Image: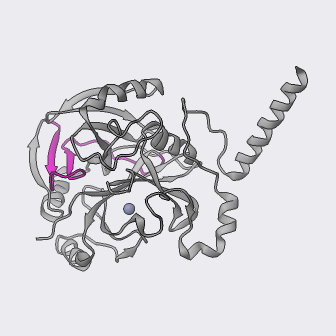
Amino acid sequence: MLKTTGIHHISSVVGHAQRNVDFYASVLGLRLVKKTVNFDDKDRYHLYYGNANGSTGLTTTFPFSDGDEGFVGAGQVGVTAYATSSNAFVFWKARLAAFNIPYFEYERFGKKRIGFTDPDGLELELIEGEFDQSHSWSFDQITKEAALIGIQQAVLYSKQPEETLRVLTDVLGYERRAEDEEMIRLTVNDNLGGALELNKKQRTPGKMGVGTVHHIAFKIQEADLEAWREKIKQAGYRPTEIKNRKYFQAIYFREKGGILIELSTVRPGILIDETVEELGGTLLIPPHYAEQTEEILAHLMPVEVRKISKMEHYGYRDRYEYELLQRRNEMKKAMKWLKE
Ligand code: ZN
């Protein structure tokens, strides 16, 4: 029987690109493993975060500095949870506090967790879990041992939880493992990224926009692409054509609970155009936009991975405003010097 093998990536709509990098790469210490532009919208970044060699499930973001705010709710992925060693919980509580990020601690299904939100309102969680840390990314004060190992699971907020449960078990291959008053825990395997939690409660419907998850992708094998399309159709859903996303091939469908699901091939993977050392270092323009490279670079705001001690105020939305702001700051500095 066809089965998915865990979370391939989770993609969200976010606000300011540099703030997104500052939060995910600098505060949380994920590695920025791919910097490209949206395949369908060349004026927006598409940023990918993962571990040192990009071998875990990827967190991908579409930054819209001027986008409309969304609401997290039914029909969406609610919480993205990253595994970290339980020994690292003390470190993470201190780090979140140092960046003035409110958090709460709780336990569910025997796992300790820390919940918080990102600067755009996306719900995140650290969940204790012992997994291979040999490819964890060390950044700033975050050691390999304390690092977020990778996406372990997601919490789904469905408009029709019974329907979503049916898709997870009958189509994607998940098995029910545990249940409490609020959640059903499912797994497809015991590997990192192999778990999900489905919220049984009816939440207010979400609204797509900045600060919400756009879709969740599950891993499949390339040879099974056509068989998967057939299986999805048989189950009563309408899959898209097979789409080539350069790093993987993908099929999308919206399940009846409202969640947009993607099935993505493990190959060829993100090492197809960069070595492990090079990952995320350069802006990679998709081939179909190659001729517009200069125009793209003139418009996109610069982003960089940097060590920070606090999240700043980001007073620009594109490269033009960024450069104006830089000039204004230079001028202010000069004026200050004149006065002294
Ligand atoms: Zn995707």
Ligand 1 shows up in the quarter that is bottom left
Q: Estimate the x, y position of residue 51 in percent, counting from the top left.
A: 37, 50
Would residue 248 be found to the left or right of residue 283 on screen? left
> Which one is nearer the viewer's eye here, 334 or 179?
334
Q: Residue furthest right?
A: 338
Q: Is residue 192 above or below residue 122?
A: below
Would residue 136 be found to the left or right of residue 139 on screen? left
Q: Is residue 92 above or below residue 17?
A: above
Q: Is residue 67 above or below residue 138?
A: below
Which span of residues is magenta-colored? 181-210
Is residue 120 shown to the viewer in this render? no
Residue shown at the point (9%, 43%) measured from the top left: 178
- Location of the N terminus by quadrant is bottom left
Would residue 22 be found to the left or right of residue 228 on screen? right
> Which one is nearer the viewer's eye here, 92 or 109?
92
Residue 150 in magenta stretch: no
> Which one is nearer the viewer's eye here, 99 or 157?
99
Residue 198 in magenta stretch: yes
Residue shown at the point (25%, 51%) measured from the top left: 193
Kindly indicate the quadrant of the structure image that contains residue 211: top left
Is residue 305 shown to the viewer in this render? yes
Q: Estimate the x, y position of residue 308 in percent, counting from the top left.
A: 55, 34
Q: Main secondary structure of the magenta part?
A: loop
Q: Estimate the x, y position of residue 113 in percent, counting from the top left.
A: 26, 32
